[in-house]
Image (cartoon, rainbow, N blue to C red):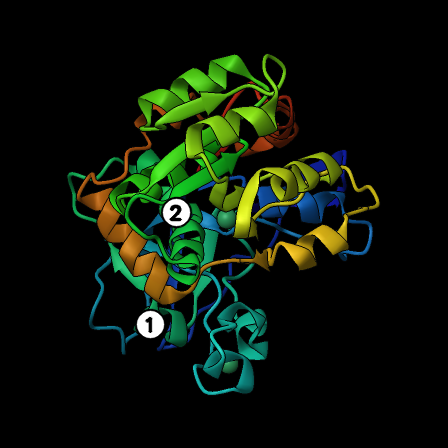
Amino acid sequence: MKALFCYSEDDFRLEEMPKPKITSDQMLVKMSYTGLCGSDVIKIFDPKDKKPRVYGHEFVGKVFEKGDNIKSFDIGDTVVAAHHIPCYECHYCLHGNHSMCRHFKETNIYPGSFAQYIRLSKEHIEKTVHKLPESQDLKEAIFIEPLSCCVRAMDRIGCLKGDYFTVVGVGAIGLLFIQLINLGGANAIAIDLDSRRLSLAKDFGADYIINPKDVDLVKEVRKITDIGADQTILTVTNNITLNNAVNYSRDGGVINIFGMANKRQPFSIDFERVYKRELTIKSHYSGTPESLKKAYDLIVKGEVKVGPLITETLDLADFKEGLDLMLDKKIYKAIFGLQQG
Ligand SMILES: [Zn+2]
Ligand SMILES: [Zn+2]
């Protein structure tokens, strides 16, 4: 079968590898579509992440082969799944840090979703594989996994009616957050340097939009919220976005780190202000099988819309092109298929 091997940040090769073999408790899924996630991008650029490697975890596919013991799915079913599964019993899990669970980190789909076929383990099948209804648009279903991460973050953050959330960076993730904030009855203030993206944020339900290039960001947030933002979600965390958030958060406000900037830079932050104003800095990493099920329902029922985020599908052989389009912000998400799949 074909799989996309990443050798370095600018060397990607579609190569042949053996099709994964399955046991009587496993399934092989033929990839229909797979999405490039911001977390894949960070790993691709991380020299410490071991390569060559097949990345990818956002996928929709059809059951191609199944073991004799699999009764809950049939050949041809279209499915989605979470790639990591926590143990629910360890110290991390008992404290709600499911994505820090060692078992969570060890479980994965094989070899990664940038491949023609993906093997799902017994544990995946029992805990996190979901069949999609036939009416479901397959490309839209790619957003179930990223939405799952946002859902888990919102569950950890808590959404009080009437609160003011700033969402910094309105790429795909920011637009998903805006909709979850709306569903929670809070106000969403979208912040981005790209006016075109801000206008789509409005269509997606942002109550306010701010382009820091045009106005004084801190003053503008204060004008809208009076006392400052209750919650900030940083989909892009760098020195500037973090320090801005410290400045426009209300006393006692919370800054939530959800995504890092691709280019690393040292942070300097005024911790005396953080302390005296009782600010909290939290982070949220990845989703769980539970948040994936919630995200599945939101997308299948159409309560979260993603249609406008989808552009054309690229062939996995043109991976670099998709990566560049996403890095250059020309598309919201690179979605790949396999031409001769
Ligand atoms: Zn993802
Ligand atoms: Zn655990």
Give amino acid for label 1. Lys
Q: Residue at x 39, y 47 (%)?
A: 147
Q: In this rendering, does residue 15 appear at all? A: no
Circles 1 and 2: CB distance less than 8 Å? no
Say which residue appears at 32% left-offset and 38% top-offset: 179
Percent x, y of residue 316: 55, 34
Residue at 59% from the left image edge and 78% from the top image edge: 102
Q: Name the element at disc 1.
A: helix
Closer-to-camera residue (139/102): 102
For residue 239, side relative to residue 109 (left or right): right
**Above or below, 7 relative to 318:** below
- Residue 57 is situated, as x and y percent measured from the top left of the image, at 50, 52
The tally of labels here is: 2
Tell which of 12 and 84 is nearer to you: 84
Image x and y of residue 189, in percent: 43, 31
Q: Position of residue 230 (x, y in %)?
A: 46, 47
Residue displayed at 61% across by 46% down = 40
Looking at the picture, does residue 237 appear above or below residue 153? Answer: above
Which numbered mark, 1 or 2, is in the foreground of this view?
2
| Residue 187 appears in the rendering | yes
Q: In the drawing, what numbered circle is on residue 127?
A: 1
Considering the image in quadrants, where does the C terminus appear? top left
Q: Residues within 10 Å of mark 1 (few under 14, many from 20)?
A: some
For the residue carrying disc 2, how many other residues have a C-alpha within 10 Å: few (<14), some (14-19), or many (20+)? many
Q: Name the residue under label 2.
A: 147
Q: Which of marks 1 and 2 is nearer the N terminus?
A: 1
User: Within 8 Å: ligand 2 and the Cβ of disc 1?
Assistant: no
Q: In this view, does 281 lie to the left or right of 238?
A: left
Looking at the image, residue 178 lies above or below residue 21: above
Which amino acid type is marked by label 2? Leu
Q: How far apart are marks 1 and 2 (CA)?
A: 18 Å
